[in-house]
Amino acid sequence: MADDDLDKEIEEIEDRVLGIHPDADMVTPWDRDIAAARARELGIELTDARWEVVKFLRDRFREQGQVEHARDLHPVMAEKWKAQGGLKYLYTLFPGGPVHQGSYIAGVPEPHDATDPSFGTVA
């Protein structure tokens, strides 16, 4: 995907979903700068590949709501990025977990079990 196309898609997401919070009465601010700051906290540089995951997580939450378990999101993500290597590829992008770290950067609530140590990391 070309940089300009990805930038346009991210801007459209920002226009549609300014903030998402588990408490429906509270909307938290979110934009590219906040996402970049959150990524820096985690020691992650937001490359185009990582932005695609962030966009996916925000769109999926907006369209389908909260995912109850990370294990429900893993196969969906593995299939979407199958050509690149599936979950193994996603863990190279987000070593602390694509659902855990990706959700934090995307500003969407993560499933309660996204930080289960039994999932492991590549770090």
Image (cartoon, helix red, strand yellow):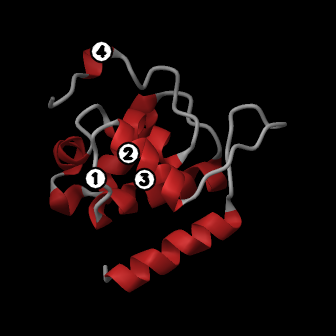
Instruction: Categorize mark 1 by other alpha carbons within 10 Å: few (<14), some (14-19), many (20+).
Output: some
21 lies left or right of 55: right
Residue linked to disc 3: 36
Of labels 4 and 2, the one closer to you: 2
Instruction: Categorize mark 4 by other alpha carbons within 10 Å: few (<14), some (14-19), many (20+).
Output: few
Q: CA distance from mark 4 to mark 2?
A: 21 Å
Q: Which disc, if any, is residue 45?
A: 1
Residue linked to disc 4: 117
**Label 4: element kind:** helix
The kind of residue tagged 2 is Ala
User: Which residue appears at 58% of the width and 35% of the height?
Assistant: 109
Tell me residue 96's x, y (percent): 28, 31
**Label 2: element kind:** helix
Reply above or below: 96 against 13: above
User: Which residue appears at 64% of the width and 56% of the height?
Assistant: 63
Q: Are marks 3 and 2 in contact (CB under 8 Å)?
A: yes
The kind of residue tagged 3 is Ala
Instruction: Categorize mark 2 by other alpha carbons within 10 Å: few (<14), some (14-19), many (20+).
Output: many
Mark 3 or 4, nearer chain start: 3
Q: CA distance from mark 3 to mark 2?
A: 5 Å
The kind of residue tagged 1 is Glu
Residue linked to disc 2: 39
The kind of residue tagged 4 is Pro
